[in-house]
Amino acid sequence: MTDTEKIKEGPKWTNDRFFSLHLEALERVEKLKLEWSNKKQANMQAKVRRKADGRFQVKYRKEPVLNEKETKDGNRNRKNKRTTSSPKFNAVAGI
């Protein structure tokens, strides 16, 4: 995929906390999911990322809404539109 084909994937991830153990980070993810379900925020995502220093970071965001791309038809193209009020050529001007 080149830079011109890059698709916008959704909202950015928000950093939550750092943990020294992976199990602690997973517990935090489960706690966040429980809080979101209590608040009726079912459209949230959470993930654990390992940093270079060995710590684990918890991140969260809203789920990106997947919209289907609309297919374009030829009717919207400007060159295909014809106006009947003003013709393209003026017959009187040619005489």
Image (cartoon, rainbow, N blue to C red):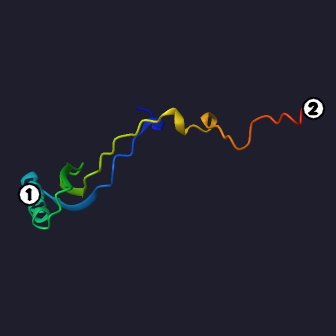
Question: Which residue is painted at 64% across and 37% down in the image?
Answer: 82
**Above/below status of 30 relative to 73:** below
Q: How many labels does the image show?
A: 2
Helix, strand or loop at mark 1? helix
The residue that mark 2 highlights is: 95
* Camera-side mark, 1 or 2: 2
Image position, residue 34 (x, y; %)? 8, 62
Crowding at mark 1 (Cα within 10 Å: few <14, some 14-19, many 20+): few
Question: Which residue is painted at 38% across and 40% down in the image?
Answer: 69
Image position, residue 45 (x, y; %)? 20, 53
Helix, strand or loop at mark 2? loop
Image position, residue 37 (x, y; %)? 11, 62
Asked whether 43 or 21 is in front, the reply is 43
Q: Which residue type does callout 2 highlight?
A: Ile
Asked whether 95 or 50 is in front, the reply is 95
The residue that mark 1 highlights is: 30
In the drawing, does residue 49 fall left or right of residue 2?
left
